[in-house]
Amino acid sequence: MSARRAGRPADRTLEFPDVTDLADPLLVVNDLHTSFRTGRGTVHAVDGVSLTVGRGKTLGIVGESGSGKTVLARSIMGLLPTRDVIRSGTVLFAGHEMTTMAPAQLRQVWGAQMSMIFQDPMTALNPVVRIGRQITDSLRLHLRLDRREAHTTAVELLRSVGIPSPEERARWYPFQLSGGMRQRVMIAIALACAPRLVLADEPTTGLDVSVQAQILDLLEAMQSERHMAVVLVTHDLGVVAKRADEIAVMYAGRIVERAPTRTLFAHTHMPYTRALMDSIPRLANPSGTRLQAIAGRPPDLIHPPKGCRFAPRCPYAQDKCRESDPPLRTAASSDHVFACWFPLVDRMPADGSAKSSASAVDYEAPSS
Amino acid sequence: MLSYVLKRLAQLVVVAFIISVLVFLLVHLLPGDPTSIILGGNDTAANRQILLHQLGLNTPIYHQYWIWLIHALHGNLGQSYLTRETVGHVIASGFPIDVELIIISQVVAFAVAIPVALITARRPNRPLDNIATTGTFGLLALPPFLIAPILVAIFAVGLHWFPATGYVPFSQNPATNLHDMILPGLALTAGSIAVYYRLLRSDLIMTLQEDFITMARSKGLSDRRIMMRQAFRPSTFSLLAVAGVNIGALLAGTFIVEYLFAMPGLGYSIVQAVQQRDYLIVQGIALVVAIAYVVLQFIIDFLFTVVDPRVTRE
Amino acid sequence: MADERKLHSPGVSSSLGIFPGQTPPLVVATALADPPVDDDILAKRPLGALFWFALVWVAVVASMAIIANWLPLPNPNHQNYTAINASPGIHHILGTDDLGRDLLSRIIFGARVSLVVGFASVAIGMLIGGTLGLISGFKGGRLDVALNAGSFVILAFPAIVAVIAIVAFWGQTLAKITIIIGVGTVPIMFRVVRASSLAFANRDFVIAARTLGATGTRIVFREILPNVMPAAVSFGLITVAGVIVLEGSLAFLGLSVALPTPSWGNLIAEGTANGNLSINPYILMWPALAMFLLLLSINLIGDRLRQRFDVREGLL
Ligand SMILES: Nc1ncnc2c1ncn2[C@@H]1O[C@H](COP(=O)(O)OP(=O)(O)OP(=O)(O)O)[C@@H](O)[C@H]1O
Ligand code: SF4
Ligand SMILES: [Mg+2]
């Protein structure tokens, strides 16, 4: 880098001091909005999301398909298409504001400090590039390793994510690997430069159940080993029940309830959260028990309904719900927020149909 | 691998055989023969019979083919009825011209199309892309016989940079040869540029929407690096396939340029020979073209396996 | 995985070049390979002024060619020795050639040849090749294998040789040239239609029709044909451009319609012939410009139509 270029703000090297106050959150997202201009209208995919992730902590983001989880994760990272996208709000990562960063600075964060595990291991690996090189790419770029060091490190990474005979596999192409193996490779890529934050976007969708648990366990092991924070995105509350420190439930582009995991399960306020809980496969149930799917479809994000967005599907909806939008409110404990006019706790004694409070322990992800 | 090569060789032999039969039938079954041209003023019925006999053209057609085949298998493709030049010699002097024309036009086409596509595909439908894409329509509407006079008017007549016509074999004077070949090569290149550019651009745009590109971005790789090392290779399949077709069509398809620039290439030689009923020349060149075509497809198939590891030779 | 590559395998697209040295068959392949994503981006855009200009130009050329006999034009073959190589002016709007023939008149009458050869021969190719491709792609089996292998062999054949040989010895009339070239485009149309027919033969709605007991003929004509049409039409247009170029190339070899009948190819060849280029560049310039604009227009129309059609296809 020449002196002239180093002087340009866009190219200035970002500082990520190691010693920081551990209580200081790693990621603070405030009022994030992302919309896409499309031929049919503007899709408000993320609509005013705020959240916080502590260093080394795990935040689970749960919601149905289409609720905007992927867009949220990509908005946090700044990995959005360049055209027809409107984003506002702030994303403070380790003291740096990501939303105003120049592309060159973003590239210093991406892969090095913050990385992403993609939803679909079948499409997220380059089909014509050997997996070894897909890992060494960022090692060479961010850690400035030479070819041989990078290769050795990549092999070690493959070994640590449980790929047998990694020396040989490094020379393979993605199509030669099974889905589970590819997801392991993706994790190896994401973890290569020991980032502080990993955004795992449904890392186990499309894998069979026993492999799912393995992958999640692997992620958890890597996380505690490296003291990374993880944002674990999933549509399955069961997946995050045991693994997340805190859970944010997303519906139609918004966070409708957020609480530490235990609190969320013990004092569920939102009917939507409850509905998600009821759709978790439980070990206790005989296999073949039909899960209670949530009736109805998520709302149109181009013209979201007036009032509470869940109202058309909510069994407890009342006129007020259809009239005005419930704001995000604080529950009994200050770290628990929810958006509902008629939270379940208030109604619990009167409403016999609601189940007694559940605990997170009931909701184990199936594991082998 | 060995069985693959053998299979390909078998294919080559079969195609070459069929082509030779077809060409043989084509030129022999149509009315007319070379005698009237050879005899000129002495075109009497008696003379004609004698000449047909001498040329071996009075026997049944399958017999003629058999004779030709036996000789061809011994490496003897005969000689021109008119000039007495051996067919082998016509091919040996003409083939390099076609090859050189094709190489020049294709190198230029790729050298223009690839970088421009790599630049414009990043921002589709922006002004730069629109200019380039519209430009390709212009190039497509310029067949060689329209480009050639323009090139000649500008670079030969106007600027005197290149000769308007003429040809010196490469072996005689490589510098002059290359110099003479540039305008004809350029006359052939316009269509290829347009086709390659549009194909690569649209495949690149498609590739850039892939998850693995977002993945590459998420690693912090620069846009430039992503274009070159992640997006380019998976976007070249159709380009390769079409380049194969295009180059195949240029084999003996350069006749119009060879005619305009007065170059004795295979393309023009075969066209001329057809018109003069110089059977042996037509057969010999057609055979070479067919073999070159099959070999070309073989090379393209091989390149597929290089570009995409998923393609295996079955 | 191997399946994915099918569309890209040389087998499919290699099929498309039949006239050596012509680029248009490749555009056919381009059109095949253009991804839906790209189209999607473009689809929302209107057809555009350029498209309408193109359409107007083709319409103008076509109607002039049709009503040429009733236009107040001098006979295109009339040699006016008092006005040799006249510059454009009131008497001869575009000037005259080295034999004093009116260039405007020759161009308008010449358009007939270019348009008839272009469109009629592709129509022939479409009728024969398209039908074969439709059936071959739908039925598959031995017939398909045979036709496919046949097209590979034909590709290895320098087709221009066949065209030249037959034109040279059968005759240089408009009808004969049209038929010969038309038969020459059969393999192109076969390959294109076969490829898309193959793609549709396994689509849900076709399978559904089959299980409902529809007959093969009915499926081919009611279900597959309408879906294959868009591709066939836009490829067809691009092939028209290719054939117009081919007529031009044949003219240089003296193998277009017999002189002195004007065709754009003949006019361009005359324009470049012995010294005309330096003495009277108009002889070349006008027909060259006319052909350039016609090819540009046809390619543009074909391309825009393809984008439109593909969108509809995507909505299926
Ligand atoms: N590039 C885009 N252009 C337009 N709309 C988009 C775009 N990307 C996402 N959307 C829309 O944003 C909404 C949220 O999508 P998103 O992919 O974030 O959902 P998700 O919660 O990740 O769902 P899934 O579980 O299926 O992955 C969807 O309605 C989707 O159609
Ligand atoms: S606000 Fe009303 S409609 Fe919305 S979740 Fe609460 S009870 Fe249901
Ligand atoms: Mg998602």
Image (spheres, coloured by chain):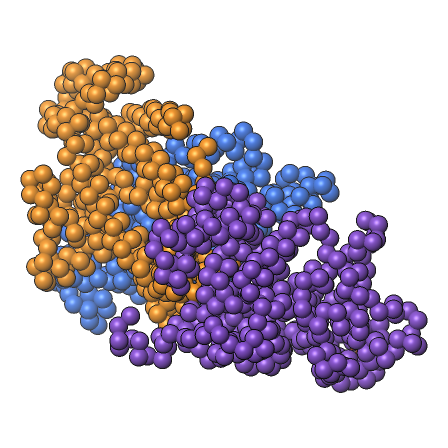
Residue A213 lies left or right of residue C282; in this view the side is right
Q: Residue at x 22, y 35 (%)?
A: B270
Q: Colour of chain C?
A: blue
Q: Which chain is purple?
A: A
- From the top left corner, tell me how far across and down residue A75 is, in percent: 55, 72
Q: How many marks?
A: 0
Which residue is more in the foreground, B76 or A182?
A182
At x 19% / y 71%, what residue is drawn?
A: C89
Residue B91, horizontal then vertical, whole percent: 18, 32
Q: Position of residue C196 (x, y in %)?
A: 52, 46
Left of A242 or right of it: where is C255? left
Image spot of residue C283 (x, y percent): 19, 59
Name the quadrant containing residue C90.
bottom left
Q: Which picture quadrant has residue B77?
A: top left
Above or below: residue B206 compared with residue A103: above
Q: Residue at x 10, y 63 (%)?
A: B158
The answer to which of C283 and A143 lies nearer the viewer is A143
Q: Can see residue B209?
A: no
Residue C137, compared with residue C31, is above or below; it is above
Depth check, front residue: C212 or C261 = C212
Quick check: B288 above or below B229? above
